[in-house]
Image: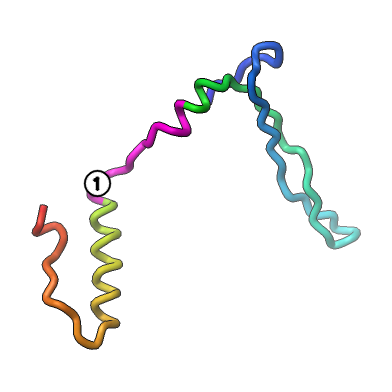
Amino acid sequence: MNEVAVQEAEIVWLIYDLSLDETRNQYQLVLYRTVYTLFEEVLSRIVTPQPGAMDGFIQHLQERLDRKLENDDNPPDAPILTDLL
């Protein structure tokens, strides 16, 4: 997101962080940063997906399928996902 001047901003993002107060051994929320942006740019960024690499996704699915099949007492004869593509 591109930051804009306070006078041009339509949205303000207040970003907080946890800070440890060692004397009380307690965390407190502390304002870390203030960011000013335009509404339309932020909305466009939020609703427009940015997909990752297909290979990594397929590999992740295959690993989960393999784990599921290992734990199943009667696993089906399932093909490897990369063979289907």
74 left or right of 18 in image = left
14 left or right of 42 in image = right
Q: Secondary structure at mark 1?
A: helix
Could you tell me residue 56's position as x and y percent? 28, 51
Q: Quadrant of residue 62?
A: bottom left
Could you tell me residue 38's position as x and y percent? 58, 19
Region rendered in magenta: 44-55
Q: Quadrant of residue 82?
A: bottom left
Q: Is residue 2 above or below residue 15?
A: above
> Which residue is label 1 attached to?
54
Q: Residue furthest bottom?
A: 73
Front-lying residue, 44 or 19 = 44
Could you tell me residue 25's position as x and y percent? 85, 62
Instruction: State yes or no: residue 51 in magenta.
Output: yes
Instruction: State yes or no: residue 58 in magenta.
Output: no
Query: Which residue: 85% across, 58% down?
Result: 22
Query: Which residue: 29% across, 74% down?
Result: 67
